[in-house]
Amino acid sequence: MPNLLIILLLTGVVHCLDTASYASRIAGVRTGRLALTGALFSIVSLVSRVAYTLQAPLLGSAVDRMVHHGNLGGLLRDFHFILAAASVGTLLGAMLIPSFITIFSRAALAYESQGSFFALLLHTLSLRGFSRISQHFRLPLPDSVRKASRFNLPRSFLLLNIIVTAVYTVGISATMYASALAPDLARTATTLSGVINGVGTVLLVILIDPVSALITDQALRGSRPVSEVSHIVVWQVVGRFLGTLLAQLVFFPAAVLVVRLARLLV
């Protein structure tokens, strides 16, 4: 696939930032500035969305070229590499969460004192800012994972998190591969990515976000230990990583299902 390395890099960046951004919730509870860290989280999400926007046309162009040369086997292999990049990005994001907690916390306090995002950005991009950020790098402690394993979290929460992540991960890839399997249905197949991601969004908003938001609010009010917010983040990261692995298994069946749905719509 042409531009495969760039696509792999962008895929890894998207999943890395999406995973590391869980740190904003922990930082918000620890500093008592949940809304402010949430705003900083939105900025990180914006960077992730930009990477996703750059990835989509490159991926579409690469698929068109592979289909033109009749190399569907190579295309399937490359899509599995892309899904593997999502798993690697998720792991890297998980490793960065402790560092991002400190960065989000300090950024929230700095923004509160400076009152300007652009002043904060200029300070961050300076040599002094970069040197301070590098000092905050730290790896996750195994003890935090062990403590999270004893947290009484409903199994349905973890299962749903895995499923939703798998849906999001294969959404655009499965529809693009479906367009390669049935070129006559290419336009219909690719538009179904919005439907697939829409289903994932509904599941996320209705079944997953309220649980983590409730625990976060209770910790902010002092009715729960702050550590429980960290525990649920650990489980969300575990679910996210397992979801990217599940995406490897459901990718081809999902593409076939998209083709069948496209034929029903035509």
Image: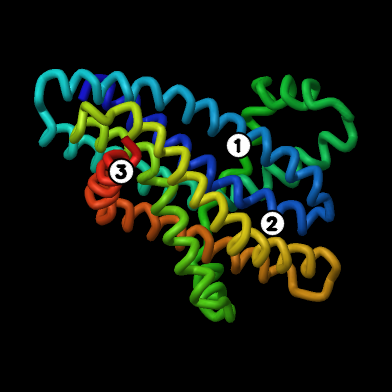
Residue under the image location 45 percent in, 53 percent down: 165
Of the two numbered discs 1 and 3 in the rendering, the one whose residue sits closer to the viewer: 3
Residue 131 spot, x, y in % from top left: 63, 30
Q: Earlier in the sequence, mark 1 or mark 3?
A: 1
From what the image shows, is residue 153 above or below residue 162? below
Task: Give the residue type that dot 3 points to.
Answer: Leu
Question: Which picture quadrant has residue 106?
Answer: top right
Task: Give the residue type that dot 2 points to.
Answer: Ile
**Mark carried by residue 264:** 3
Residue under the image location 40 percent in, 38 percent down: 192
Residue 13 spot, x, y in % from top left: 45, 35
Instruction: Please give left or right for residue 27 compared with residue 170 in the image.
Output: right
User: Of residues 171 and 188, which is closer to you in this image?
Assistant: 188
Do the CB atoms of the residues marked 1 and 3 lie less than 8 Å apart?
no
Which residue is the site of mark 2?
Answer: 26
At label 1, counting other C-alpha atoms closer than 10 Å, the crowd grade (few under 14, some 14-19, many 20 or more) is some
Task: Give the residue type that dot 1 points to.
Answer: Ser
